[in-house]
Amino acid sequence: MAIKKDQLVTMTFELKVDDRIIESNMGEKPMTFAFGSGQLLPGFEELITDINEGETRTVTVLSDKAYGPYDETLNEKVPVREFEGIDLQIGMVLEGEAQDGSIFKATVTDVTKEEVTVDYNHPLAGKDLVFKVFIEKIV
């Protein structure tokens, strides 16, 4: 039976990217969410609609249905002086405020004496997401 909009779904999951587990609640407290409420990736919800209560399945959310393709144009070189007082490390995630007041995140990908390269792509952009899902309950 298909999961319907606004039903409460309780599940455990394991998320792999590039054959590496990056998040899991298997063996821990399950999560409960209202299906179709926008809490989860729409591409993920599309793939679990036909999973029944008590069933386990592995589904792959392709990058275009997840966080989109990786966009090289979202990399920027910024003068290192703009990061005064920050101990910059490659892989560090920085938060900033856009002109419209919204918060954005950027990952430091390179640091030289003159400039810092930051990447505004989501860390999972361009990646296919492989979920192992166990649907515990549908209400």
Image (spheres, helix red, strand yellow):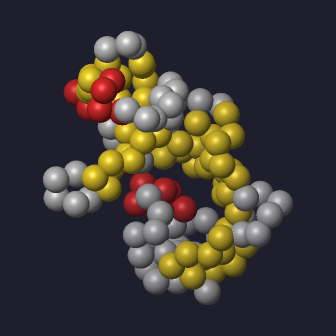
Looking at this rendering, what residue extends furthest in the bottom direction?
Answer: 139
**Which residue is at 52% across, 27% downward?**
89
- Residue 98 visible here: yes
- Residue 58 sits above or below residue 18 on the image: below
Find residue 64 and report its image quarter: top left
Q: Quadrant of the C terminus?
A: bottom right
Task: Say which residue appears at 46% left-offset and 83% top-offset.
Answer: 6
Along the line of sight, the residue nearer the viewer: 62 or 27: 27
Q: Is residue 51 left or right of residue 116?
A: right
**Which quadrant of the structure image shows residue 26?**
bottom right
Question: Relative to 87, does residue 113 appear above or below in the rendering?
Answer: above
Tell me if residue 63 can be seen: no
50 vs 137: above or below: above
Identify the residue at the far right of this view: 27
Q: Residue furthest top?
A: 113
Question: Relative to the observer, which residue lies in front, 82 or 34?
Answer: 82
Residue located 33% across and 48% down the image:
96
Residue 75: x and y in percent read 29, 27
Left or right, 25 with reference to 98 = right
Give the percent coordinates (x, y) of residue 77: 27, 22
| For residue 36, side relative to residue 14 (left or right) | left
Write the residue at 70% across / 63% down: 12
> Residue 90: where, in percent of width, then height?
50, 25
Depth order, front residue of 21/115: 115
Q: Position of residue 109 (x, y in %)?
A: 43, 24
Q: Residue furthest front?
A: 85
Which quarter of the image is occupied by the N terminus? bottom right
